[in-house]
Image: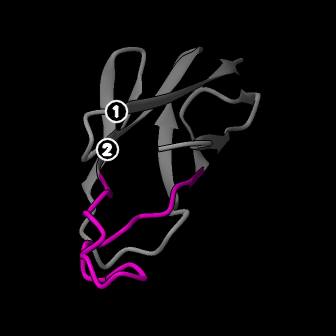
């Protein structure tokens, strides 16, 4: 898929034990496989089917996405941070592609 662009928003700093809000948006058409092209042929399904977020190697959030999810899916969730580290966001596509984004947070 051309031009898939993940974007994430994570606070740059936080206090120890603070609950922070993480936001993600990824540009993706999310073709459900239900539509047909101009010639009447089915357009193959191509969706992001799995999303995970890990902090310093430990999973903090994950979800499965189904064909009914909109194009350019947006996710927002909270995480408690006890130490400085890196959030790694991963999206898995039906075509086998993997898209990732990383963002660091400094805990004081």
Tell me which residue sits at (59%, 47%) in the image. Answer: 22
- Residue 79 vs 84, above or below: the answer is below
- Residue 20 vs 89, above or below: the answer is below
Q: Is residue 106 left or right of residue 82?
A: right
Camera-side residue: 42 or 56?
A: 42
**Mark-to-mark CA distance, 1 and 2:** 5 Å
- The image shows residue 68 at horizontal and vertical percentages of 31, 79
As drawn, the label of residue 93 is 2
Q: Main secondary structure of the magenta part?
A: loop
Q: Is residue 6 left or right of residue 78?
A: right
- The image shows residue 31 at horizontal and vertical percentages of 37, 68
Residue receiving disc 1:
97
- Residue 64 vs 2, above or below: the answer is below
Camera-side residue: 60 or 32?
A: 32
- Residue 31 in the magenta stretch? The answer is yes
Q: Is residue 100 left or right of residue 51?
A: right
* Mark 1 neighbour density, 10 Å: few (under 14) some (14–19) many (20 or more): few
* Mark 2 neighbour density, 10 Å: few (under 14) some (14–19) many (20 or more): some
Tell me which residue sits at (54%, 16%) in the image. Answer: 83
- The image shows residue 102 at horizontal and vertical percentages of 57, 23
Q: Are marks 1 and 2 in contact (CB under 8 Å)?
A: yes
Q: Residue furthest right?
A: 12
Q: Secondary structure at mark 2?
A: strand
Tell me which residue sits at (35%, 81%) in the image. Answer: 39
**Residue extent of the magenta highlight:** 25-48
């Amino acid at each position: 898929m051309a031009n898939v662009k993940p974007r994430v928003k994570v606070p740059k700093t936080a206090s120890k034990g603070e609950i922070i809000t993480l936001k993600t948006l990824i540009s993706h058409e999310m073709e459900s496989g239900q539509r047909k092209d101009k010639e009447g042929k089915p357009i193959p399904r191509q969706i992001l089917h799995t999303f995970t977020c890990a902090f310093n190697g430990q999973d903090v959030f994950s979800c499965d996405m189904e064909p009914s999810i909109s194009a350019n899916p947006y996710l927002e969730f909270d995480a408690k941070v006890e130490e400085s580290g890196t959030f790694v966001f991963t999206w898995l596509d039906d075509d086998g592609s993997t898209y990732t984004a990383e963002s660091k947070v400094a805990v004081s």
